[in-house]
Image (cartoon, rainbow, N blue to C red):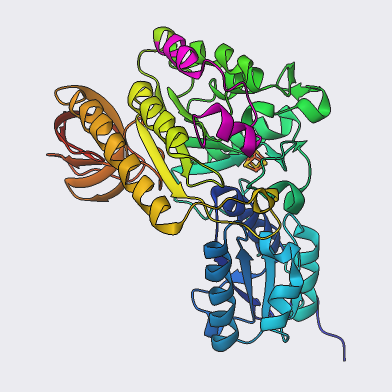
Amino acid sequence: MTVPASVPTPAKAAPKISFVSLGCPKALVDSERILTHLRAEGYELARRHDGADVVIVNTCGFLDSAKAESLSAIGEAMAENGRVIVTGCMGAQPEEIREKYPNLLAVTGPQAYESVVAAVHEAVPPAHDPFLDLVPPQGVKLTPRHYAYLKISEGCNNRCTFCIIPSLRGDLVSRPAGDVLREAEKLVRAGVKELLVVSQDTSAYGVDIRYATSPWRDREVRAKFYDLSAELGELGAWVRMHYVYPYPHVDDVIPLMAEGKILPYLDMPLQHASPSVLKRMRRPGNQEKQLERIRRWRETCPDLAIRSTFIVGFPGETEAEFEELLTWIREAKLERVGCFEYEPVGGAVANELGDPVPPEIKAERKRRFMEAQQGVSIRLQKARVGKRLPVIIDEANGGIAKGRSKYDAPEIDGNVHVTSRRPLRVGDIVTVKIERADAYDLYGSAV
Ligand code: SF4
């Protein structure tokens, strides 16, 4: 008997994937790519491990503490489901994971989208229905809909001695500018109000492809930090720059911030201020006369907010070198600062430097560093009281909301707590009169 063409065949239930994404914003972008691919093939996302056909854990292997978190997430997935695929930075060293969890379905390294997808196909083949499996053209976002990470390159050409990312992710590979801009445009069309530009080294964008041009709209755009920033600035969204190292050509981008094309914000992980420590760290960028450059940037763009992270207790760090850092941080007056105690990462060159700083001295230096910065932060925050600032709303419950000013990135910086007579919605950009400040957050009412 033949089945008449008009009788629909029963649809196969869509296989379900449970996904854990650990690590930095860059890993989050990888997770989004994997999920977009799988959603396009008809897979669905499960909220819990126990109802899923397979679990994917995207790991972070940067610090030992991140590795421990990754291993525990894998353990949880094994206990609750048992069918687990591991990917991400830690997947570059599969022996350690396999030793602990020999029954994993697959272990793949970072950026190995194809291998992850192939492993999923093997574990649970797709039930593809091209008419039902619609995926929004901008992909699947793991971040809230009003902001999205935009990854412009993979890997890194630097060789900082404390870091193993280049050995995990390889040398710099930049995406053509046209591709990045098309993705950004799709995101904005889908309702994204803030684009967070990420990579391992944003200011090095395009070096590997010799700043090659690629078509975008009616013109050719160079894969260069300035050119990309200028074009992104035309899309009508907030554009925030992360992981920018202080190379001289960063100077060119500051006027775009002053003109309001991109946000007056630089996430610039400096890690230290003592030239001798920076040399041992083999940090990129011209570290000399840093204060002078920051002063010039602020002359061009008085509104500029700089966020940075620093490491204390790097091997061989003397009290005098640490004091240099303290003096620098007091003078530089950075808006947002994070401080980490140095932690040796398996496979990093810095492990061979010897002369480790004892844990109690590391902890004490971190405390002194944070104390010094807190004085700076409080003064800078108080200076915002009385100002009217545009604030993007991240969470809202009627007239009570939490958002961020242009000076604050999601997840890492402070918040603005807002009260409003009219109900606010996530993604709204409202003007808020700042009434109060503490070292991290601002408080005010929508005008
Ligand atoms: S710039 Fe340095 S710390 Fe950053 S990813 Fe490259 S090697 Fe690692």
Which residue lies at the image location 43% right of the left edge and 8% below the top edge? 300
Of residues 272 and 410, which is closer to you in this image?
272
Residue 158 in the image, given as x and y percentages of width and height: 71, 36
Residue 406, placed above or below residue 117: above
- Residue 207, by quadrant, is top right
Q: Please, is residue 136 above or below residue 439 in the view?
A: below
Give the total of numbered labels. Answer: 0
Residue 293 is a magenta residue: yes
Question: What percent of the width, then of the height, locates residue 363?
Answer: 38, 53
Rendering quarter of residue 96? bottom right
**Which part of the image, by quadrant, shows the C terminus?**
top left
Tell me which corner region of the image, top left, top right, bottom left or bottom right, holds residue 108.
Answer: bottom right
Query: Residue lying furthest bottom in this view?
Result: 1
Compare residues 184 and 260 and report the one nearer the observer: 260
Query: Where does residue 333 sit, x and y in percent of width and height?
Result: 34, 24
Query: Quarter of the picture for ligand 1?
Result: top right
In the image, the segment drawn in magenta is 271-298
Q: Position of residue 280 (x, y in %)?
A: 63, 37
Residue 255 in sight: yes
| Quadrant of the frame with the N terminus | bottom right
Residue 201 seen in this snapshot? no
Q: Residue furthest right?
A: 1
In the drawing, does residue 175 fall left or right of residue 353?
right
- Is-magenta flag for residue 359? no
Indicate whether 173 appears above or below 285.
Answer: below
16 left or right, relative to 368: right
Q: Nearer the viewer, residue 247 or 240?
A: 247
Q: Tell me: 139 left or right of 271.
A: right
Q: Residue at x 59, y 56 (%)?
A: 344
